[in-house]
Image (cartoon, grey):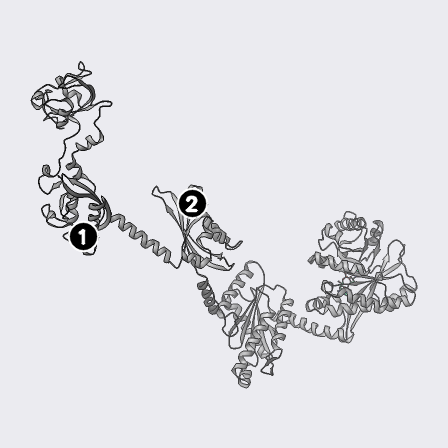
Amino acid sequence: MQARPAGSLEEVVNLSPLPLAVFVVDAAGRITSWNRACEKLAGYGAADIRHCSLDQIIAFDDPATVTWIGDRVNEDSTGELICADGHRVPVRVTVAPQSLDPDQPGGYSVIVVPRAGLAPTRYALIQDLPIADIIEELPCVFYVIDQSGHLLLWNHQLEDALEMASEELPTFNVQNFFDERDQAMIVEKILNAFERGRSYHEADLVGKHGKRTTFLFHCSRASLGSLPVVFGTGLDITSRKEAERGLRVRERAMYASVNAIVITCCADGADNVIEYVNPAFEQITGYTLAEVKGRNPRFMRVEDCDVGEQHRIHDAVARRQSVRAVLRNRRKNGEIFWNDLRIDPVGSMEGEVTHFVGVINDITEARHYERRLQHLAHHDALTGLANRTLLLERLKAAIDAASSHRRQGALAFLDLDNFKHINDTFGHEAGDAVLREIAARLRDSMREEDTVARLGGDEFVLVIAEQTDVTQLACLVERVRQSVSAPVVVEGKEILPGTSIGVSLFPQDGRTVDAVMRAADAAMYHAKTLGRNNVQFYSEELNQVVHQHLLLEASLSRAIRNGELVLGYQPKVDLRTGKVVGAEALVRWQHPVDGIIAPDIFIPVAEQTGLIIPLGDWVLDEACATLHALAAVGIEDFVIAVNLSARQLRQRRFVNRLADTLARHGVPAHRLELEVTESQLMDHPEEARDALAQLKLLGVRLSIDDFGTGYSSLSHLQKFPVDCIKIDRSFLGGGTDPDDGHEVITRAIIALGHNLKLQVIAEGVETIEQLTFLRDHDCDQMQGYYFSPALAQDGLQEMLRRDARLPM
Ligand SMILES: Nc1nc2c(ncn2[C@@H]2O[C@@H]3COP(=O)(O)O[C@H]4[C@@H](O)[C@H](n5cnc6c(=O)[nH]c(N)nc65)O[C@@H]4COP(=O)(O)O[C@H]3[C@H]2O)c(=O)[nH]1
């Protein structure tokens, strides 16, 4: 390909020959032609050197080693060029074969370059360049335009872009190679170049068949002889433009995205610091780019929240991997939002991850909506209680948990006894109000972990996740029944709901949801047939237990009111003197029909139902009355011990009430002793210690009952401000075998008590051997049938009057 001139090339451009001196020699080394540079450099005319041998013109530095010109191929030789006037120019000589075909050897080009200091000037070099070849090989279009706007010279790249043949191009004014809308600008730019020397612009060349190519044109003014021209190049920037357009679109998209976009940098050890955030980021988080630039996005995380997700992100980023996580972040205003976050690594051209792009999607609303839907799908619209779906789920989970952890749970079906009547009489709105009220009462009666559901209509269901003690369960269900049956006031009218409750236990009554539901349903049906407003268990045996328990509870509260309780006093004896120094008050129930009932039967019921509070108050009052009566007959130096339940101890104003009782009977506090069992103290040791400290301040004596069974640690024991410990009677044993394990424990307890400066008393002493053992080991006091059972107040008074003593 040759650069295309409008006329002949020689006419338009004086293409200088090469600036290097080049001889062409044949295989024998005879000169066949040369260029103008040779003539210039050596000063020979054509006639002078044609057919000369190369050796006559160049004196090689190494003539001896090379005899044939072909040996110098690709070798750099040095020598001197012998000029026409005789002077010599040091030169570097390069020989290149004119044909690469070894079978057809041609001549050789011998390039002669003057050495050091003699190289031609840059301008001289340029002058001699093979411009036509260079122009054709340029990686761009080349053109020379005259003042009329027509092409004088161009390269084939321009023909390709315009889809035209060589002869067509000069027939057009160059503005016609562009879109109409660009033509004025093109003319202006060419004129600018003519006037100011140079101009540049971007424009699309439009080919004859519509091909468009975007070029960056540079125009410069020059002159060809006297003819002013503009010449220049056009660089094809189509793909760069497309890339730029694509980038702009993407940048715009990023800018306009409703999702927050964060770009962080991790190159060169950077700690994923924020480089860019888009406007949506500002909208979602409240932070501007300036506020977050240079910070790691983790500053938005909520401490101790979604820790698993945070770890996943951390791990993926450390491994330079993509990750998606849903977690909570904090906005600038402190509000927390749900973030559906996607993070992707961005690699450099070399494949190294330098950045991460994070897309934050605020899904807070969607989350709430999802939760609402979830709630609606699982809850009853009228009452907000769990619906059948959720109930079945929870029941299954509770049955599975109970089965695998060997625990017991319960399912209770409640049916309102007269709901149809309520609806018919008071209307549906009143009916709805009753249902809502009952739902609220049920919720209040149950623990957080239990489930309260409504199956529709007037059917409610309770899943009691864990309740191993059936008596407590019976109390709970009975409380629920009472609470549901309490009057509901709707629009000023009092409505009495009443409910029948059926209870089944799992896994005892069934191991599947179906079986447990059927059992509870059957129990409820039974409750309805028994005259409504009552509770029935599926198991008959349990019904009996519960029934008796409920009977006992009902009659015990009557017993307290009717004065059916009496105190017995079991004397306590000083083991060193044999003298009766005190007594333990033990309560009995004189039932009008069943006779004396032992406290072991009714105290647990009293504890569970809360009746222990009025019962305990009565016992304290009665014991103080006895102390007062004894003092009245001159028995002053005497202590009565009363058993105290932890529930009494926990009462807020217990100490004040006790102080009132003592004052009312005129009894000094130190004559009353309160016994609390070790296991009750150890249930809540800190609380117990505080309560005991307050009692101690009041001046009463304190003692730990059943000592040795409650696993109290020595440290606790030291902190309880007690005066006395009472060895549990299970440790007394027979008292005959010195190697008996019990005796070892008893000895240890006595020693321990004495080390802590506490009195030690043994209860349940029945034999002389036990007594002897206790005496031998320095126990302080004893109590037990060996000396005396509990006595009525008269009996005790009589014993004290005659100063009955334990034989020494
Ligand atoms: N085998 C045997 N037993 C003996 C002997 N000497 C006394 N006992 C019995 O051992 C129990 C000692 O009372 P506790 O350990 O405080 O155990 C008491 C105490 O925990 C509780 N209790 C009794 N009265 C009250 C009270 O007023 N309030 C409270 N909260 N609990 C009471 O009832 C439990 C049982 O009392 P009781 O049936 O009166 O039984 C009494 C007493 O009658 C003996 O030599 N051998």
Q: Callout 1: few (<14), some (14-19), or many (20+) C-alpha neighbours within 10 Å?
A: some
Q: Position of residue 191 (x, y in %)?
A: 20, 48
Tally of numbered discs: 2
Vertical position of residue 644 compared to residue 458: above or below: above
Residue 625 visible, this orientation: no
Vertical position of residue 204 compared to residue 17: above or below: below
Q: Quadrant of the N terminus?
A: top left
Residue drawn at point x = 39 percent, y = 44 percent: 353
Residue at mark 1 to residue at mark 2: CA–CA distance: 47 Å
Q: Callout 2: few (<14), some (14-19), or many (20+) C-alpha neighbours within 10 Å?
A: many
Q: Position of residue 150 (x, y in %)?
A: 13, 47
Is label 1 within 8 A of ligand 1 (CB to nearest ligand atom)?
no
Question: Which residue lies under the disc numbered 1?
Answer: 178
Vertical position of residue 221 compared to residue 52: above or below: below
**First in residue order: circle 1 vs circle 2:** 1
Q: Position of residue 390 (x, y in %)?
A: 49, 67
Q: Quadrant of residue 229?
A: top left
Look at discs 1 and 2 and give the one toward the viewer. 1
Q: Position of residue 3 (x, y in %)?
A: 13, 40
Q: What is the three-letter code of the residue carrying label 1?
A: Phe
Q: Quadrant of residue 629?
A: bottom right
Q: Quadrant of ligand 1?
A: bottom right
Q: Quadrant of the C terminus?
A: bottom right
Do residues under tags 1 and 2 come within 8 Å of each other at their CB atoms?
Answer: no
Instruction: Indicate which disc residue 16 carries.
Output: none
Q: Is residue 681 left or right of residue 10?
A: right
- For the residue labelled by badge 2, is the local secondary structure a helix, a strand or a loop? loop
Question: Which residue lies under the disc numbered 2?
Answer: 266
Q: Is residue 613 left or right of residue 82?
A: right
